[in-house]
Every structure is written in C-alpha cells, then in structure tokens.
Amino acid sequence: MTVSTRFTQRFELATPIALAPMALAAGGALSAACARRGALGLVGGGYGELAWTQREVTLAYQLLQDAPIALRRLGCGFITWKLDEDASALDWLLDQAHTPAAVMLSFGDPRPYAARIRARGAALICQIQQLSQLPSALEAGAQVIVAQGIEAGGHGVNALQGRSTLAWVPELADALASQAPQVMLLAAGGVGDGRGVAAALMLGADGALMGSRLWATQESLAAAGAKQQAVQTNGDGTARSAVFDILRRKNWPAPYDFRAIRNALHQAWEDRIDVLAKDPQAARADYDAGVQAGDFSRAHATVGEAVGLIHDLPAAGELIERVTLQMHQQLQRFGPQG
Ligand SMILES: Cc1cc2nc3c(=O)[nH]c(=O)nc-3n(C[C@H](O)[C@H](O)[C@H](O)COP(=O)(O)O)c2cc1C
C-alpha cells in the first residue's frame, strides 16, 4: 500500500511526512536521511544564522548527490520575525544553483519574503497557529499551510490563544476548502507515530509535519543528554511558557512562547515568570552553567507532548519507515477489508 496525497505528489514523496525545520536540530544529516526515505526534509534555518545554514544545507545537498529524487525533497525553514532583522541566510539559500523544494516560514508576517521565494521556484510553506493568521499566509501565496497545535515542541502560540491540533486541523481544512482549495494542509503538533499521521489525514490534512519525534533520532543535532532525558520523560512532562526564552535571552514577540521538558529549573520559575523577566541574571547564570555541564535539570530539552511516544533513538530513516508502516496499518484497519 502507498498513500498518495496532493502533498506526496507535489514533492515526489513516498510518505506524507515532512521533517519540521527545527532550529539547530534539523541539520543536513537529518534532512537528508528523511528525504532519502521519502519524506520532505526541511533544514532548520531557525534564527537565520548564515554560517550554520550554509554548512547544514550544503551538507544535505552533498549527502544526496547520488539520489536526484531525494535531493528534490530538500528545503529549509526560517523564523520569520528574525528574517526581519537579517535575511542573509534566506538570500544565500535562494542564490544557490540547486532550487530548494520549499521554504517554510513560521512566526511572523511571510509577505515580505514570499515573492522572492516563489520567484526562485521554491514552494512557500507557512506555519500558522490561529485562523486569524490565514489571510496573510494566503496573500503571501503559500502553497502549503501548516496548522500547528499547542501540543508542539518548540515555539508556538501561547496556551491562552493557541489551538489544539484535533479541532484546529479540520477547521482549517474547511476554511481552505472554501477559500483556497488548491492550497495544501499539513498537521503539526503531537504527531509522534503512524497513528498520528493517519489521524492527520483523517482530519483533512494532506500530510503531517513532525518535529519532536524526529528530533529524537541519531542524526538530530540535539545534545545526547537532552535526547536521553526525552526517552525517560512521558507526555505529562512538558510545559509551554516563556521561561526558557527569558533564560536564553531570546526576545520572542507576543503571542509566542515555547514548549520543552518541564525540568527543575523551569519548575523553579514557572509560577514567577514576571519576577524572572524583571531580574533574570542569577537564573541565567544557573541555566548557562547547566548548558555547559550538560545538566538537563537546568538546560532545556526541546520536545512537545509527543515526548510520551519517544522510547528510543533510532536512525531517522528507520523511524520514517516505522511510522509509515504503522500509518498504513491504521488506515487498513478502517478500510474496506479492515
Ligand atoms: C527542537 C525543535 C525546534 C523547533 N524549531 C523550529 C523552528 O526553528 N522553526 C519552526 O518553524 N518551527 C520549529 N519548531 C516547531 C516545528 O516546526 C513543529 O511545529 C513542531 O515540532 C510540531 O510538533 P511536534 O514537535 O509535536 O512534532 C521546532 C520544534 C522542535 C521540537
């Protein structure tokens, strides 16, 4: 059985899965491994650091020199509000001889960057967290919209305003069906195995974007200690807040905050975020020392609620195969012969 959707057809994929462009974790090796096994491989250009993006995108291209179809499944993602400060990494990406399959923009207004991305022949993917963000994504000419729920690891819209994947994805599917039926939809947030990918399809998406589960793989650039902590943490063990952004000196604009493992340092500050924001020096020193020591009771491990589905750290290609097989099994259970 193969699952064919508009998304798999458009990007020549063997499975309706995209690797989330996770800042500092989704490097060249992870993106290439995902693309080789048939998924869309998005390098985590994140904060738009030029040297990092150059190194990891170049590595991904090199790793797939022998695999022309997989090479065409590579793209890159950026944090949009950081591009407003410095877009040199995006400019570099679009200047390369190889055309990226897609550029994904999240967390900010995509319109200033849309024309040059589409003019270069790359698909524009916009990740949104609320229905109110849909008009600007459509105006930008997004070919794919990612509906990100608050279960997601990393940044997203805070719990006050954010949406949960289960109701958000079908609502957005309906909105696209009436406003822009040619635009594809991916579900993101809490998709950690083949049940989640099958569910995304059932909810009306053309595929799923997976972050946390692919973060916990051999090729991911996340710290080994963080990955180990994730294996030992269940889905109750994450929280969404501004704590780690304050500790990391990241000036994220409202309404965004960050989901990671709710470790001891997070718990020490989560009820006193105003105090932390006002006087962060001592806590930052504690955090920095934790990072330096690889102590994840203080340093952060960026995963979402799907951490409860992470029990091992396989090679990414093996994981994509496993998830795809389970997706097929789920879909067959409810098919005509099921
Ligand atoms: C470690 C990590 C880093 C992330 N960094 C980014 C990023 O730089 N840009 C972005 O658009 N999304 C980022 N995300 C969010 C993903 O795009 C995606 O929405 C999320 O991972 C989906 O939920 P899941 O983690 O439950 O699979 C990140 C997620 C994780 C786990």
Image: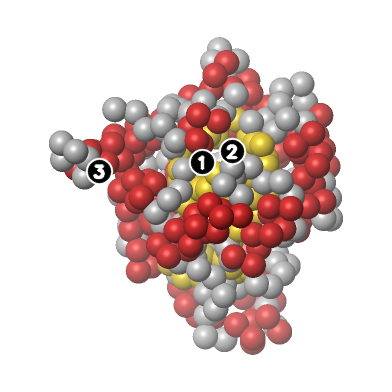
The residues tagged by marks 1 and 2 sit, at their Cα atoms, a distance apart of 6 Å
Tell me if mark 3 has few (under 14), some (14-19) or many (20+) residues whose alpha carbon lies within 10 angstroms of its own: some
Q: Which residue is mark 2?
A: 42
The residues tagged by marks 1 and 3 sit, at their Cα atoms, a distance apart of 21 Å
Tell me if mark 2 has few (under 14), some (14-19) or many (20+) residues whose alpha carbon lies within 10 angstroms of its own: many
Residue 205 x, y percent position in the rendering: 45, 48
User: Secondary structure under badge 3?
Assistant: helix
User: Secondary structure under badge 1?
Assistant: strand
User: Secondary structure under badge 2?
Assistant: strand
Q: Is residue 281 above or below residue 296?
A: below
| Colour convention of the picture | secondary structure
Q: Earlier in the sequence, mark 1 or mark 3?
A: 1
Q: Earlier in the sequence, mark 2 or mark 3?
A: 2
Contact between labelled residues 3 and 1, with CB atoms less than 8 Å apart: no
Residue at 16% across / 40% down in the picture?
A: 338
Left/right of residue 171 with respect to residue 82 in the rendered view:
left
Q: Which mark is residue 19?
A: 1
